[in-house]
Amino acid sequence: MSVRIRKAGREDIPALAALIALSVEELQAEHYSAEQRRGALGTVFGVDTQLIDDGTYFVAEMDGEIAGCGGWSQRKTPFGSDHVAVKDDTLLDPQIDAARIRAFFVHPRFARRGIGSAILSACEAAAQEAGFTRLMLVATLPGVPLYAARGYEAGESFTVPLQNGIELPVLRMHKHVRVEAQLSGPR
């Protein structure tokens, strides 16, 4: 079975919202309480249409089904859906700032089959093509092993306040990537 990566479109939003809810409920249950998962759904965990509109959000399809989603951003907002409390859509400068890796979710039926890694590869390649040499993400606890295995280094641990009054522990992670210099003329 091969994984097909494509850019997400607005027509995918209902399927993505359902996948995100299922992924959070099942795959994050070992790391977060039911209250934390419920409090994060719709704000911290959810669809950010800005990523879709920017063409930086991807879906992975396997066997004709959406098996996962995730993206990258050239905007300052580090995480969250359309409904996150603080959102900053200011563009980042690739010469100074780190691109944001954002909103990775896998359908539980397709977990541990390389879906997250395939989407992450597509995101890293696109961010590098846009001139970014550094990547930053805010990882949920179940996502830390994937990112660590892909070369991301742990940074600051912190908690995100949720709409129901509790907090969600997360970890900021970073990675440096090399951008191939474009040479003009013959070598």
Image (cartoon, rainbow, N blue to C red):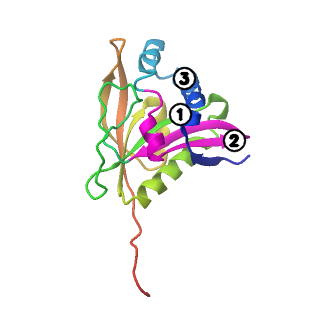
Dot 1: what SS? strand
Occupied quadrant, residue 80: top left
Q: Position of residue 51 (x, y in %)?
A: 44, 41
Q: CA distance from mark 3 to mark 2?
A: 19 Å
- Closer to the chain start, of discs 1 and 3, is 3
- Cβ–Cβ below 8 Å for labels 3 and 2? no
Q: Is 172 inside the magenta-drawn segment? A: no
Type of residue at label 1?
Phe
Establish if 67 lies above or below 161: below
Q: Which residue is mark 2?
A: 62
Where residue 18 sits, quadrant-wise, is: top right
The residue to which callout 1 is attached is: 105
Q: Mark 2 is on which residue type?
A: Met
Disc 1 + disc 3, Cβ < 8 Å: no
For image coordinates 47% across by 23% down, the residue present is 31
Left-right relation of 66 to 124 = right
Return the residue at label 3: 21
Mark before the other along the chain sequence, 3 or 2 = 3
Q: Residues within 10 Å of mark 3 (few under 14, many from 20)?
A: some
Measured in 3D between alpha carbons, the distance from the residue under mark 1 to the one under mark 3, in whole angstroms, is 9 Å
In the rendered image, residue 150, in percent from the top left (x then y), is placed at 48, 49
Earlier sequence position, callout 1 versus callout 2: 2
Instruction: Please give the range of residues in magenta.
Output: 45-73
Taking the image as shown, residue 160 lies to the left or right of residue 1, namely: left
Residue 180 or residue 49, whichever sits in front: 49
Amino acid at circle 3: Ala
